[in-house]
């Protein structure tokens, strides 16, 4: 995540593209590791986290492509520019949806944890 923020601050588009590719590769590798070690709802939760981060890397890579297709010499290159910008909009919405689901999931997990703590505390005080 910090690498993506660093890439946003740097002015070199080539460096941004390399970082985006590396981050996407790392997210895929991390998901493969999670797939081997976790299962069930925990795997889904971690997959959603990695999806949001991985799509952020892809968005950054597309941003580099937008930079190089901004002032085209042909209509064909401009068509690619417009297509990439539309794909970026879809990615933004997908990241927002993933982040929303993750936020709700965390709230449910937190509520379950608090409920368990309160229930355990009331159960031990009721036995005294």
Image: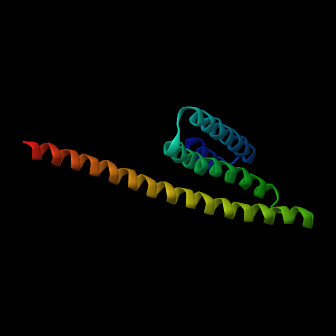
Q: Position of residue 11 (x, y in %)?
A: 68, 48
* Camera-nearest residue between 93 and 71: 93
User: With 12 as the anchor, is 92 left or right in this view?
Assistant: left
Coloring scheme used? rainbow
Point out the image quarter for the C terminus.
top left
Which residue is farthest front?
127
Between 10 and 33, the one nearer to me in the picture? 33
Image coords of residue 5 (percent x, y)? 58, 47
Relative to 77, say whether 35 is above or below.
above
Quadrant where the image shows the N terminus? top right
Q: Which residue is rendered at x = 10% and y = 43% of the image? A: 127
User: Looking at the image, which residue is at 21% across and 45% down?
Assistant: 120
The image quadrant of residue 85 is bottom right
Given residues 37 and 48, the one toward you in this image is 37
Q: How many marks?
A: 0
Q: Residue at x 72, y 41 (%)?
A: 18
Q: Position of residue 93 (x, y in %)?
A: 62, 63
Horizontal and vertical percent position of residue 117: 25, 46
């Amino acid at each position: 995540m910090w690498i993506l923020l660093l890439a946003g601050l740097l002015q070199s588009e080539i460096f941004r593209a390399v970082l985006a590719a590396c981050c996407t590769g790392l997210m895929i590798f991390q998901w493969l590791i999670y797939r081997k070690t976790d299962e069930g709802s925990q795997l889904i939760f971690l997959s959603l986290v990695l999806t949001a981060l991985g799509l952020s890397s892809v968005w950054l890579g597309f941003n580099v492509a937008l930079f190089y297709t901004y002032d085209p010499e042909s209509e064909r290159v401009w068509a690619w520019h417009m297509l990439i910008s539309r794909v970026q909009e879809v990615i933004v919405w997908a990241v927002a949806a993933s982040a929303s689901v993750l936020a709700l999931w965390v709230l449910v997990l937190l509520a379950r944890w608090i409920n368990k703590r309160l229930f355990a505390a009331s159960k031990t005080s009721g036995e005294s």
